[in-house]
Amino acid sequence: MMSMSNTRLDNKTALVNGASGGIGAAVATRLAAEGAAVVLGYHRNAGAAERLAAELAAEGARTATVRADASDPEQCAFLVDRAASLFGPLDILVSCAGIEHFDTIDALGSEAFDRIFAINTRGQLLLAKHTVAHMRAGGRVILTSSISAQRAVFGHTLYAASKAAVEAMVLNLSVELGRRGITINAVAPGGTATRMAEENAVHYRHPNLDLPLDQWLKIHGALGRLADPREIAGTYAFLASADAGYLTGRTIQVDGGHF
């Protein structure tokens, strides 16, 4: 657990969705460590969300948990409204919830399209829409893309497209939100040591290359390893801070020098 000693985000309120594990949990921990009150949005893993909330509270953070399904438009609105009712106007939104998908073009169907885009794209857009209604000038909206939006991977069409759409949303919303004094950016993580990555790592390799994951990473990354979620969280924390006040409409790739 990170000591609650950095005050860069003192008196700020953050909503972090997808906070029950992986990158989202690391972001929530980092923002709390920098002084923010944090609402942990989650869908399925109530136990993990509650444990993290208890850990953060034990370190002196103001925190709460709210359950919501990002694929449901009504629950997106509920999550934001509930977060604002708990701690007041929102200063920071971090949207980390998302799901993976691999399929060949012959197997692609409308049901999979609707499910992937409902969570990875529409859910993020609606969270941003509802959050900015509760934001003052100086607000920070941070969505989550993926390096997959800029990398060709076998069978990854729907997932990559859903993340590329996020980058387009961030770029275009920056013009509109800039008039309100609100910035919007996205983080595009590379391979990160999370449960989702562990479950899907085999699909990222070229089908004709039978290499262990550690060797594949050394061939295709300057740092030659997966990221720790805490290393990714640092970029979200930067974008949430005053240090990023003149940065908007951009997607930052945090990929360990993927090539």
Image (tube, rainbow, N blue to C red):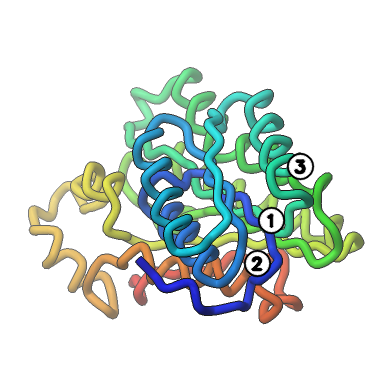
Which callout, 3 or 1, points to the residue nearer the camera? 3
Residue 6 in the image: state x and y as whole percent: 54, 79
Q: Earlier in the sequence, mark 1 or mark 2?
A: 1
> Helix or strand or loop: what does disc 3 sit on?
helix
State the residue at coordinates (74%, 40%): 85
Residue annotated with mark 3: 129
State the residue at coordinates (22%, 48%): 198
Pick the residue in front: 227 or 56.
56
Q: Earlier in the sequence, mark 2 or mark 3?
A: 3
Residue 77 against residue 229 in the figure, above or below: above
For the residue marked with disc 1, what is the amino acid? Answer: Val
Label 1, label 2: how many angstroms apart (C-alpha)? 7 Å
> Helix or strand or loop: what does disc 2 sit on?
loop
> Helix or strand or loop: what does disc 1 sit on?
helix
Label 2, label 3: how many angstroms apart (C-alpha)? 18 Å
Residue annotated with mark 2: 250
Quadrant housing the C terminus: bottom left
Q: Locate residue 68: give its quadrant.
A: top right
For the residue marked with disc 3, what is the amino acid? Answer: Lys
For the residue marked with disc 2, what is the amino acid? Answer: Arg
Residue 177 in the image: state x and y as whole percent: 83, 57
- Which mark is on residue 170? 1
State the residue at coordinates (53%, 60%): 61
Are dots 1 and 2 in contact, CB under 8 Å? yes
